[in-house]
Amino acid sequence: MSDTYSNPLDDPAADPFAVASDAAADIARLTGVESHDIALTLGSGWGGAAELIGETTATIPATDVTGFSKPALEGHVGSLRSILTPGGKRVLVIGARTHYYEGHGVRRVVHSVRTAAATGAKVMVLTNGAGGLKTSWSPGQPVLISDHINLTADSPIEGANFVDLTDLYSRRLRDLARTIDPTLDEGVYCQFRGPHYETPAEIQMVKAIGGHIAGMSTALEAIAARQAGLEIAGFSLITNLAAGIQTTPLSHEEVIEAGQQAGPVIGALLARFVEAL
């Protein structure tokens, strides 16, 4: 790969799976943990869950790992943790999500997921903070992702690789989550490109095409996770009602505040879910 690229994933000639394998080797070396069983990406509002999952045996800056970028968003910690659960499972906690709107390209967006698979993980848990369309939902409420609609006009799949996305968000894992919290509702997540929030008309479009949750992450990662052979669970924290449904203006401060208030509840939910895997 050429030295002119600051990130190896920016080289069009690079093999993104080879870069993920290099990243997994970095994680093994820096954490002292040869392989992980579960990977968990913590989106807006979900960061506190890491403290409840188990014993953190290593924390490393994500930028010390091949291919990772510094997070651009407040509320994302920019680190990777190796956690040992009470049941003896190894969890890789990813606090360094690269969003599509940052303009680094889809390879960097899904690099964390491909790296998780390369560390040996079999289950990928994706979380986010997002806007809700169901008026029965309220800010601070966690919901399961049952399916998604990718509105980025992009894909992490390169070449003629026709990946089946049927049951992308595992029904088994959704059923497992409801054994922990039977009140969990679910909905279809729509990933927009961002970084601006959606217009009321766009939210009405989402409703018309069958969506219930609007956000700026997760869908591309889930596609890459399926290609890598991971079983996927998705959780959204409803941080606000979406544009045109909520009567007040949308703001990132609102997202952060909803996450802080909901933190203890959703953290406990996620910790119990991980332990049940």
Image: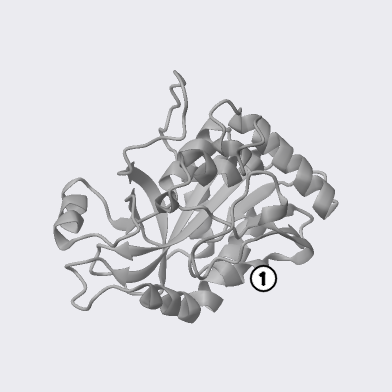
Up the image or down, 36 lies above or below 77; here it is above
**Residue 170 visible (yes or no):** no
Q: Is residue 129 visible?
A: yes
Residue at (52, 31) in percent of width and height: 227
* 20 relative position to 129: left or right: right
Is residue 245 found left or right of 7 in the rendered image? left
270, above or below 155, in the image? below
Report x, y in % for residue 260.
49, 79
Give residue 269's quadrant in the image. bottom right
13 or 232, nearer to the observer: 13
Question: How many numbered discs, if any?
Answer: 1
Q: Which residue bears the numbered disc 1?
A: 52
Residue at (49, 65) in percent of width and height: 73
Q: Quadrant of the N terminus?
A: top right
Q: At label 1, which amino acid type do we have? A: Leu
Considering the numbered disc 1 on the image, is that residue within a helix, a strand or a loop? helix
Q: Nearer the viewer, residue 141 or 19?
A: 19
State left or right for residue 29 relative to residue 36: right
Give whichever of 88, 183 is nearer the camera: 88
Please name the residue shown 60% across and 46% down the image: 112
Provide residue 20's location: percent of width, then percent of height. 66, 37
* Left or right of 121 in this view: 87: right
Residue at 71% in and 49% down: 65
Bin the neighbour count of mark 1 within 10 Å (Cα to Cα): few under 14, some 14-19, many 20 and up. some
Q: Position of residue 63 (x, y in %)?
A: 67, 54
Image location of residue 246, percent across then percent down? 21, 73
Which residue is situated farthest in the front direction here? 4
Give the colouring mode of the picture.
one colour
